[in-house]
Amino acid sequence: MRNPIVAGITVALLGLSGMALAKVAPEEAAKLGGELTPVGAERAANASGTIPEWTGGLNTPPASWKKGDIETNPFPDDEPLFIITKANAHLYKDKLSEGHLKMLDQYGPDFFLPVYESRRTAAYPQHVYEKLKENALSAELLDNGNGVRDAIMTSPFPIPKNGLEAIWNHILRYRGTEIEFRSASATPQRDGSYNPVVNDYQYFIAYSKKGAKLEEIDNKIFYLKTNTVSPATLAGTITLVHETLDQIRSPRLAWRYDSGSRRLRRSPNLAYETDLPNSSSLRSVDQKDMYNGAPNQYEWELKGKRELYVPYNAYMLHDEEVRPDDVIRPRHINQSLARYELHRVWVVEARRRVGISHIYDRRVFYIDEDSWQILASEEYDEDGNLWRVSEAHNISFYSEPVFWTTMEMTYDLKAERYYVDGLDDGYKPYDFSPGFRSSEFTASAARRDARR
């Protein structure tokens, strides 16, 4: 893969086994909020001006939105600058990922990328920016990179030196502290027919609570509880997850309540390559949120930066009038509702460790420099063939200034089917202040919920 833009701090992850990597020097951290944004991105525009300067992001909601509403489109008059198709993809090859090039070629005229003006909207609260600089001065990887110490609230390595630090920036990025929402997922057949699965989600992100201390959060990143609403055959199924910071020392804890058996059972295999529930075997558990869990099955390499056309500012997919039938199409989503922009992304490659069993032999991640959110990824099989392509379509939320996914999908190029999550059928807006307590996310609390 050609790297037209290579960051000066490109470093391969070689020989790191057993090492705790050092924090950055004070003179490096001083760049945060100056030539670098508080998150660690290049503040300046690119040479051609096609990527603008970061000026603070979208930190003031548009006049069209009021608290309690679903986020409205802050750029309603934007039109595509151009549309990339199979016929003209060669003109943009240096700014397209291998995954998008493959999809344009394989799916022909049905699949296209509408490219819009680039808008660097990612923004976070001021206290998160302050913690990013503190983390830069203190954070270190644990032995073998299986966890992080001396960091809290948000990404630990805003000036990353290797692939492990970059992937931990995604895993630990700030997404708020309490979130409640409803969304639907689907795995359409090749003809576009589908049966949605609707879930209620509740997050309590202990790691990101203001004033939290690492020694007080019991090695937990977050607690997650999902409750399946429909279809009737799955309704009442509850999944509870305790996501741990060091998953080798203290593995992820997971329980599942099956409404049929009416029992809450531990789910020790809800990790790594296990099929994501209700994904029709089109997505693995560690692809949820684009990548999650312990990174110990791969060798990670930071390849540098590229300017790529990536999903961004997906307010049309997030629109309260858009329904699942508007989104679902045979083989891929309705691309006329998608928005792609030119952004700088970190490129991280993961290669499966010798002796490890995983369905993906190699993976490539494209991480937004402005948010540490993975925007796209590619998954390769053991023969080196591109198997799946994943996308995260994100927006800047308004009630809590965070840049986060509104819709994710994984495209299986062999089956020519896909998994999509984040479908909205008239549900309430995301609630970033539901008032949860960690005690509501225990196994006993999940049993009580199941009996109601």
Image: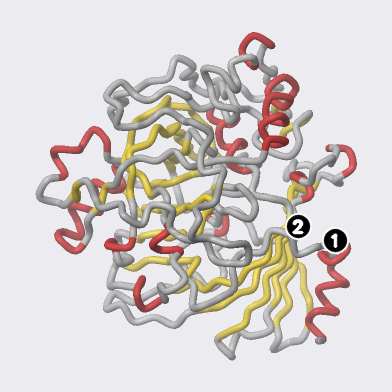
- Residue 55 seen anywhere in this rendered image of the structure: yes
Q: Which mark is residue 16?
A: none
Farthest left residue in view: 87
Residue at x 70% of width, y 81% of height: 258
Farthest top residue in view: 27
Q: How is the image coloured?
A: secondary structure
Mark 2 = which residue? 204
Q: Is residue 434 placed above or below 207 in the rendered structure?
A: below
- Side of 184 where 378 appears, left or right: left
Q: Nearer the viewer, residue 16 or 122?
A: 122
- As measured in the structure, the alpha-carbon distance from the residue carrying label 1 to the one carrying label 2 is 7 Å
- Side of 28 where 311 appears, left or right: left
- Side of 40 where 270 appears, left or right: right
Residue at x 42% of width, y 26% of height: 303
Classify mark 2: helix, strand or loop.
Answer: strand
- For the residue carrying disc 2, how many other residues have a C-alpha within 10 Å: few (<14), some (14-19), or many (20+)? many
Q: Is residue 260 placed above or below 40 in the rendered structure?
A: below
Location of the C terminus by quadrant is bottom right
Q: Is residue 55 placed above or below 437 in the rendered structure?
A: above
Q: Nearer the viewer, residue 29 or 282?
A: 29
Q: Nearer the viewer, residue 5 or 59?
A: 59
Classify mark 1: helix, strand or loop.
Answer: loop
Q: Which mark is residue 437?
A: 1
First along the sequence among labels 1 and 2: 2
Residue at x 50% of width, y 56% of height: 63
Measured as percent of width and height from the top left, residue 432 is found at 68, 59
Three-letter amino acid code at the position of disc 2: Phe
Three-letter amino acid code at the position of disc 1: Arg
> Mark 1 touching mark 2, by CB under 8 A?
yes
- For the residue carrying disc 1, how many other residues have a C-alpha within 10 Å: few (<14), some (14-19), or many (20+)? few
